[in-house]
Image (cartoon, rainbow, N blue to C red):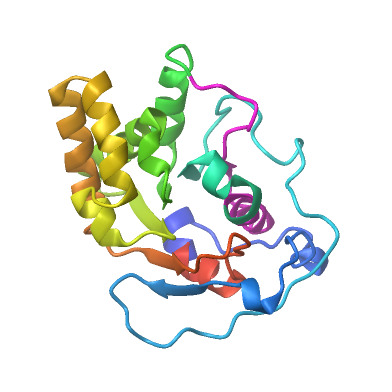
Amino acid sequence: LFKLLFGRTPTILNASSRTNNIIPSPASALPSISHSGDHSKDAPIPQQSNDHGIASASDSVLSLPRGEHEVFLSFRGPDTRQVFTNTLFILLKHLNVRTFMDDEKLEKGEEIWPSLVAGIRQSKVHVAILSENYAESKWCLRELAEFVECRKQDKGHILIPIFYMVDPRDVRHQTGHYQSAFQRHEQMFSAKTVQAWRDTLNLVGTIKGWRVGSKDKYVIPPYHYLLQII
């Protein structure tokens, strides 16, 4: 699958330490991760430990996409950046997959939106980490809408939703946390814009993706699951 997606076999960078750049977490804190719609038992989760938790500034993309990226990560920073998304980025980096992950200090605005769109369109794989507060951000919703548009225009684009602590039904029907977010959006944006975002979530909520389930905040994406994702 990796070769089909990226046209090459996976190359592990710094293979001797590929499990070393993972945020430590007790086994009891690890979530259950399953394919959405898949009721099979959870596979065992490997133990990981080390001293280096967060991707360094030199590892991450600090501002705008530069050159072609293979994977674009869309996520709500306060929900997932420090553990799940950061760890996903590190593991993709170890597989030598060029990944766009925005910098925590970068404030999104209209002036950089064209560059973000370019980065999305350059990327073959779009990963949407749909967390409880994802729909609170108009930028997350705009990125997700662009993912869907790319998918419509070119079947070569692959959209992978990760339902992080949320039920896909809440995403699809905008219930739960997503309902309250849209109640606020309806007061700030046009009916056309809000409906377009609803349509996007309705579609994404039906795509077979991956569910991360646990109310514990220390969540690590297991390595073998990530290999299946990509």
Displayed quadrant of residue 21: bottom right
Position of 89 relative to 211 (above/below): above
Magenta stretch: includes residue 129: no
Place of residue 59 in the rendered image (x, y in percent of width and height, measured from the top left): 73, 41
Place of residue 51 in the rendered image (x, y in percent of width and height, measured from the top left): 86, 59
Which residue is at a point 77% across and 42% down the rendered structure image? 56
Which residue is at a point 34% across and 48% down the rendered structure image? 177
Displayed quadrant of residue 217: bottom right
Q: Is residue 75 at all visible to an observer of this figure?
A: yes
Q: How many marks?
A: 0
Which residue is at a point 41% across and 19% down the rendered structure image? 114
Front-most of 203 and 186?
Answer: 186
Front-most of 216 and 71?
Answer: 216
Relative to residue 55, is residue 96 drawn left or right? left
Which residue is at a point 34% across and 63% down the rendered structure image? 209
Position of 60 relative to 97 (above/below): above
Place of residue 211 in the rendered image (x, y in percent of width and height, measured from the top left): 40, 66
Position of 59 relative to 169 (above/below): above
Relative to residue 136, is residue 55 drawn left or right? right
Q: Is residue 1 at all visible to an observer of this figure?
A: no
Relative to residue 25, is residue 66 drawn left or right? left
Magenta stretch: includes residue 102: yes
Numbered range of the magenta stretch:
85-108
- The quadrant the N terminus occupies is bottom left
* Identity of the residue furthest to the right in this view: 51
* Identity of the residue furthest to the top in this view: 111
Position of 203 relative to 143 (above/below): below
